[in-house]
Image (cartoon, grey):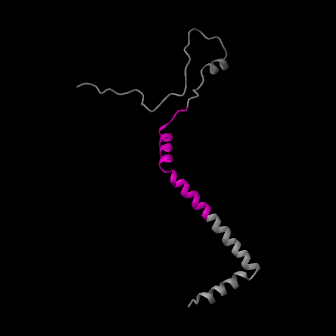
Amino acid sequence: MSKKKTKKFRAGIKSNIKTAPIVGAYSGSLEQIESAVEPTSEIIETKADREHAENEKQYSFVRKDVRKLGITFSILVVLFVGCYILSTQTSILTNLGSWLYKIGNFQI
């Protein structure tokens, strides 16, 4: 039976550090060594980032709906607070209610 070939590294994992080849003995300070070996400026995409981007594309309409619901809820709260303040300071809403009751011929 033969051995199964296994990959040493997974396809989705990339290293984020570039190493500079050392040609000879380096006689610089520690700061110069650290500046010679810098992390890459490329964006490394992990599995979680890919899934987040896919979900964001797939469910973009949900964000719009939630935003609309939030705006609607805010407007309703403002209207209710305005009606409460208007009813405590004036009798306009009471008179409007009585007028609608007379016009509509509602029976309780």
- The structure residue drawn at horizontal position 57% and vertical position 8%, both measured from the top left corner, is 24
Extreme residue in the front direction: 103
Numbered label tally = 0
Position above or below: 98 against 23: below
Q: Nearer the viewer, residue 74 or 104?
A: 104
- The structure residue drawn at horizontal position 50% and vertical position 43%, both measured from the top left corner, is 53
- The structure residue drawn at horizontal position 62% and vertical position 88%, both measured from the top left corner, is 103
Prevailing secondary structure class for the magenta stretch in the rendered image: helix
Q: Residue 49: x, y in percent?
A: 51, 40
Q: Residue 16: x, y in percent?
A: 54, 28
Extreme residue in the left direction: 1
Q: Residue 84: x, y in percent?
A: 70, 75
Position above or below: 100 against 49: below
Instruction: Specify whether residue 37 is painted magenta.
Output: no
Quarter of the image where the C terminus is located: bottom right
Q: Does 88 sit left or right of 105 as displayed?
A: right
Instruction: Specify whether residue 51 is painted magenta.
Output: yes
Quarter of the image where the N terminus is located: top left
Extreme residue in the right direction: 89
Q: Does 80 sit left or right of 53 as displayed?
A: right
Please state the extent of the stretch shown in magenta in the rendering.
Answer: 43-72
Q: Tell me the quarter of the picture where residue 20 sits.
A: top right
Q: Nearer the viewer, residue 68 or 35?
A: 68
Q: Does 81 sit left or right of 57 as displayed?
A: right
Position above or below: 93 against 7: below
- The structure residue drawn at horizontal position 73% and vertical position 75%, both measured from the top left corner, is 85
Q: Residue 42: x, y in percent?
A: 56, 29
Q: Does 58 sit left or right of 94 as displayed?
A: left
